[in-house]
Image (cartoon, rainbow, N blue to C red):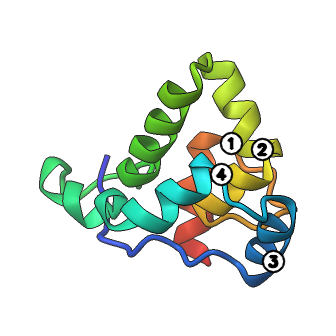
Amino acid sequence: MSMRSLPAPAVPESTARVARAAFSRGCLAMRIRDEFGPVFESEQFVAAFAHRGGPSVSPGMLALVSVMQYAERLTDRQAADAVRGRIDWKYALGLQLADLASISQCSASSATG
């Protein structure tokens, strides 16, 4: 697997608007994104990957999903469901609200914009 250094995707405007309306006082996933976002930049992980080969899943996004999964004590399946269906997780991962991406598709959606 190879990896390009890509910045974390910006939170889409529609996702941010809906998330802030739904969670007016914020929530854990949104605070993690807002306060610790740079910790989960893929650039931090580039040295661990080859320069050639197929693209990898963004390790920054996987790390962020792992932290949120641990914080909420979710199973792997529950975390995957949260990526697909929860507004706060879509905000944290910078996904469109209509994006039904699984965890393995997160890097592809961020790479293609």
Residue holding disc 4: 27
| Spatial separation of the CA atoms under disc 3 and disc 1 | 22 Å
SS of the residue at dot 2? helix
Residue type, numbered disc 2: Arg
Residue holding disc 1: 102
| Spatial separation of the CA atoms under disc 2 and disc 1 | 6 Å
Q: Badge 3: few (under 14), some or many (20 or more) residues near its Cα, within 10 Å?
A: few
| Spatial separation of the CA atoms under disc 3 and disc 4 | 14 Å
Residue type, numbered disc 3: Arg
Q: Position of residue 75 (x, y in %)?
A: 61, 16
Residue 4 appears in view: yes
Residue at image location 62% in from the left, 78% down from the top: 113
For marks 3 and 4 on the same chain, the one whose residue lies earlier in the sequence: 3
Q: Is residue 56 left or right of residue 3?
A: right
For marks 3 and 2 on the same chain, the one whose residue lies earlier in the sequence: 3
- Number of the front mark, 2 or 1: 2
Q: Position of residue 70 (x, y in %)?
A: 48, 26
For marks 2 and 1 on the same chain, the one whose residue lies earlier in the sequence: 2
- Number of the front mark, 3 or 2: 3
For marks 1 and 4 on the same chain, the one whose residue lies earlier in the sequence: 4
- Specify the label residue 84 is tagged with: 2
* 75 shown above or below 6: above
- Number of the front mark, 2 or 4: 4
Q: Position of residue 68 (x, y in %)?
A: 52, 37
Front in this rendered view, residue 37 or 25: 25
Q: Are marks 2 and 1 in contact (CB under 8 Å)?
A: yes
Q: Are marks 3 and 1 in contact (CB under 8 Å)?
A: no
| Spatial separation of the CA atoms under disc 1 and disc 4 | 22 Å
Residue at image location 36% in from the left, 48% down from the top: 59
Q: Badge 2: few (under 14), some or many (20 or more) residues near its Cα, within 10 Å?
A: some
- Specify the label residue 17 is tagged with: 3
